[in-house]
Image (cartoon, coloured by chain):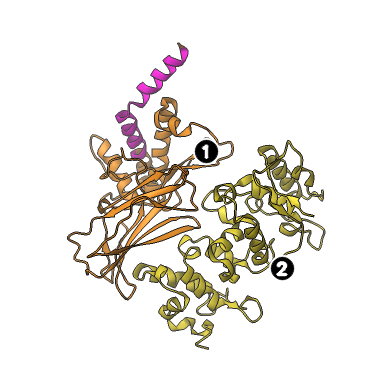
Chain colours: A yellow, B orange
Amino acid sequence: MGDLVRVLSDKGIQSFKGYLAEIRNGSTKAPPYELLTDPWSSAKIQWEVEIERRDFDSKLEASRFLYDRFRMLPYLQVDQNIGLWSWLSLYYFELVCPRNENGRRLPGQDCRHIIDLDFRRYYYHLLNGPYNIYKLHKEKAPLLLSGPLYRTSTFYLQLASRQGFVTNKGVMEAANLLYYDFLNGRPKIAALSKKKPGTLFRFIIVIQQLDLTYDLYSMNGEEVLNLLPSEFDEWHPNKL
Amino acid sequence: MIRRFNYTGRKKLARTRVSISLTQTSDNLLAFDAAVQLDGLDLPPSAKIFIEAYRRAYFKRISCGTVSDPKFLRKFILEGLDPQALVRFRVKIVDKKGRILAIADRIIPRRTEEESTDKICLLPVDFVDLGQSIWRLDVDSDWPSLQLNKRIENIREIARSDNYFLTLVYPEIVRQVLYKIVVEEDHTDPYTDDDWMSQWLRFVTDLSVDKLLPPSGESEPVKMEKLKWIDDAVNAFSSNNKVLEKFIQSQNLREK
């Protein structure tokens, strides 16, 4: 038996923010799960969506699960609904902010748990960010959606923060082909190195240059890879 | 001064050649009409035309035929986008090899039929949840925009016609935008391009009587001159818009 999804009210969000500030300052208090059902802090939504507390192996699995639950709802009620994603963040708090080996929770900035709609931070939310990536690319963005929910990877930050990258299916496919180890289900080792040629940071610079000349949105991943100079050959699965 | 190289001969499609207007459908969806004027650009007839709408993680690309047979759009629905969202557009002309022959980017669509087609919007408005704030100026994305808190029911009308809002907020917006352009970016030539910084500079220099341009450079004395230039520009803006007069009128009305 699952729980019906609700939304945190302004009061609920303020209480949640207060809790985040407390644990940031060292408090070991338990998460305020009572906000999830307290009628002053949360409210029902128009539709009955049921979820349950469970483990997710990766951001991909979590966003697939959430997408499956919310895809039939009007996007205006879901995508940027601050109350909804704050409620979900508190509901899955053990996954987005687990205790570390010292028993402390390290929540980071509020925008990891409560959506900040500023264009510099909207993708930081630990559940809504991956959800939006999944909505755009479905199963084709494992590079961005690998790893546990509480950890925001450099791949995610570097690619999701760039509108021209994250919305471009060909560029995303190329990044996955170059830097994702499909055999072992994780990003390739050293793909973030600043010393090796052809790593992610060079990929970003080179794609930005190519974008001035080529209509990259019309290309698939292989076609994008064919435009890259030889320094990327080491990472290219067909050129090894 | 910023200099740009264009080794591939890509043509710039002036924004004035592009007309995009948004409407809200009865189902509360966002739709747009688009037309692009391509005469005289000497583009190959077979080159393809694409229009792209984008905002954050939203992206929609629409094929609009070829240069010789363009198929521009009427009431094309942008599904998945908040109807109040500030969406931007890009027009690309692309050859068979996928090379960009001409491009116009960061196009801000007109919102209503009343807005003139040949005017460029300097300050688009975005309606977002700003928590306890009324407004915020976003000068760090690709075009400055005024964000208004959508929690306030009639905020659109307030921002358009409330004299308190107009007189207290807009001069401050002009100041912040000019600070970004002149001090932070040291962009001081209004005639380099049709990017937003040049367009803002053209707008404010046209308001002043002496049409003086800001000084260029990053030394401390030059910075002081720049701040003085910004003060003068804000004053010229306020004077042109009768800011003091409107504020006093509103105050008098309130006291009555």
Subunit of label 2? A
- Is A125 situated left or right of A239 in this image? right
The residue that appears at 48% across and 73% down in the rendered structure is A203
Q: Are marks 2 and 1 on the same chain?
A: no
Which amino acid, by three-letter code, is at mark 1?
Lys
For the residue labelled by badge 1, is the local secondary structure a helix, a strand or a loop? Answer: loop
Residue at the spot of label 1 = B150
Q: What residue type is labelled 2?
A: Asp
Quarter assignment of residue A41: top right
| Residue drawn at x 62%, y 51% as measured from the top left | A111
In the rendered image, which quarter contains the N terminus of chain A?
A: bottom right
In which quarter of the view is residue A13 placed? Answer: top right
Q: Nearer the viewer, residue B218 or A150?
A: A150
Q: Can residue B151 be seen in this view?
A: yes
Q: Taking the image as drawn, is residue B214 in sight? A: no
* Real-space Cα separation, disc 2 to disc 1, in angstroms: 37 Å
Secondary element type, mark 2: loop
Left or right of residue B134: residue B76 = left
Q: What stretch is highlighted in magenta?
A: B229-255
The chain letter under disc 1 is B
Outermost residue, top direction?
B256
Q: Position of residue A106 (x, y in %)?
A: 73, 56
Please name the residue that numbered disc 2 is placed on: A57
Residue extending farthest to the bottom is: A240
